[in-house]
Image (tube, rainbow, N blue to C red):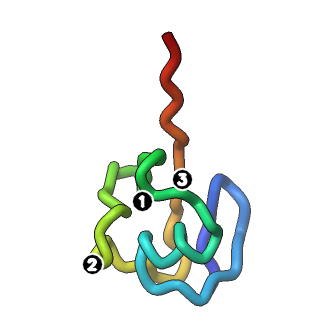
Amino acid sequence: MKIVYQGEVTETSADTVAGFLNERNIPIQSVISELNGEVCDGREPESPALHEGDALNVFRIVAGG
């Protein structure tokens, strides 16, 4: 299926946000996900489902001190 990831059309076999993050080797504890303009919790296995054409953005959490 094709989704729009970070503004680019991307092919994926994942059917959930968590599956996509895992597929891309993105550490789920250090990111916030936005699916179709809504913040979502991609850290749970039963995270939101992905559908053809969905827009997914992932933001890394960075802390300093």
Residue 1, quarter of picture: bottom right
Q: Earlier in the sequence, mark 3 or mark 2?
A: 2
Task: Name the amino acid type tagged 1.
Answer: Leu
Q: Nearer the viewer, residue 19 or 7?
A: 19
Please state the horizontal and vertical placement of residue 45, each as a whole percent of the image: 32, 77
Q: Residue at x 64, y 69 (%)?
A: 24
Mark-to-mark CA distance, 3 and 1: 7 Å
Mark-to-mark CA distance, 2 and 1: 14 Å
Q: Earlier in the sequence, mark 2 or mark 1?
A: 1
Is 20 placed left or right of 50 in the picture? Answer: right
Task: Name the amino acid type tagged 2.
Answer: Glu
Q: Mark 2 — residue?
A: 46
Number of the label disc, if any, that sits on residue 35:
1
Q: Crowdedness of circle 3 by 10 Å Cα count: few (<14), some, many (20+)?
A: some
Task: Name the amino acid type tagged 3.
Answer: Asn
Number of the label disc, if any, that sits on residue 57:
3
